[in-house]
Amino acid sequence: MKSMQIRVFPTPQAAARALAADIGRTIARVPHLVLGLPTGRTPVPLYGELTRLARSGAIDLSGATTFNLDEFLGLAADDPRSYRSFMRRHLFAHVRVRRAHVLDGAARDPAAECDRYERAIRRAGGIDLQILGLGRNGHIGFNEPGRALVARTHRTRLTPATRAANASLFGGRVRDVPREALSMGMVTILHARRIVMLATGASKAGCVERMIAGPLTPMVPASFLQVHQRVEVWLDRAAASRLR
C-alpha cells in the first residue's frame, strides 16, 4: 500500500485531461509504448481528450501498441455492443493506432484465444502502462470477486452486478448482456510496468476505500494493486470522498 500514489482532481474531466497529457508525455519519450486500455463509462472522457490531443498534433499514437483488458464472450468484432466497437467509437476511429489488440469474443475456441492473447502481449515485450477502471464490486477487467482469482487471460462468468453495469450497451436490457467474457488475469495486469487506476464518481467511493485501505482479498480484486511497485490511483473528489 505504501507504493500507491493517490492524486485527486476536482472533476472527472480534469482527471481525464491530466491523464491524457501524462500519456502524451510518455509517448513522446517512448514512441513505441505498449498501452493497456479499459472500457466502460469512466475512460470515455480520457479517450475524448486523447482524440483532441491527436487532432491538434500534440500526441502521436501511431507507434504505440494497445491491448484491451476484456471482451464479451459470443460477440463478434463488428457487433455494435462489443468492446471492440466501443473502442472504435471512442478512440480508434479518431486516432491512428497501427497495432490495436482486442480479445476475439467470437473465437471458436475461447481457451486458445486467451493463450493467443497472452503470447501477443509477451511478443510486444509486456505492457508498459496499464490504465484501469474500477467496478463497483471491486473488479478490474472482468476479474470478478470470488474465493480465488485467475492469473492469466481467461474465460470468466460475470456477476449480476457487472451485467447490470453494462446494460447501457444493450439497450438497458440486463437480460441481453452476455453471461460470460474473456479477460486479462490479475497476474497479466500486475506485470505491467506502471499502472494507473482511474476512478470517478461517488458510486466508486466505497470501493476505492476498500481497494486502498482494506485487506488484500480476492473478494476485492482491485486490492491486489497494493502489491504493485508502481501504481497510481487517479480520482475525482467524489470517488475520494471516503479516504482519510
Image (cartoon, rainbow, N blue to C red):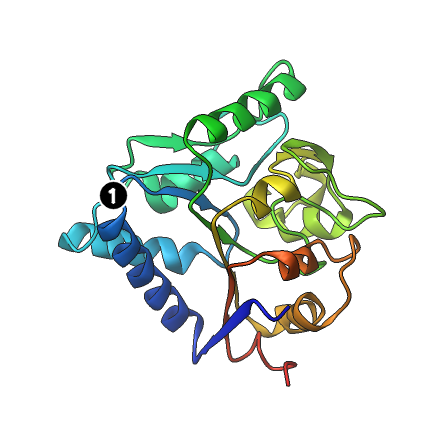
Q: Is residue 78 visible?
A: no
Given residues 109 and 90, the one toward you in this image is 109
Query: Does residue 127 appear left or right of residue 146 in this picture?
Result: left
- For this orientation, the residue located farthest to the top is 108
Q: Residues within 10 Å of mark 1 (few under 14, many from 20)?
A: some
User: Which residue is painted at 51% across and 46% down in the image?
Assistant: 192
User: Which residue is painted at 55% across and 56% down in the image?
Assistant: 133
Q: Is residue 218 visible?
A: yes
Q: Which quarter of the figure is the N terminus placed in? A: bottom right
Q: Position of residue 128 (x, y in %)?
A: 42, 45
- For this orientation, the residue located farthest to the right is 147
Q: Give the SS element for disc 1.
A: loop
User: Which residue is painted at 78% across and 66% down in the image?
Assistant: 215
Given residues 122 and 161, the one toward you in this image is 122
Q: Position of residue 126 (x, y in %)?
A: 46, 37
Among the 4 quarters of the image, the one containing residue 14: bottom left
- Amino acid type shown at disc 1: Pro
Which residue is the site of mark 1? 31
**Vertical comparison of 28 with 113: above or below:** below
Q: Which quarter of the figure is the C terminus placed in? A: bottom right
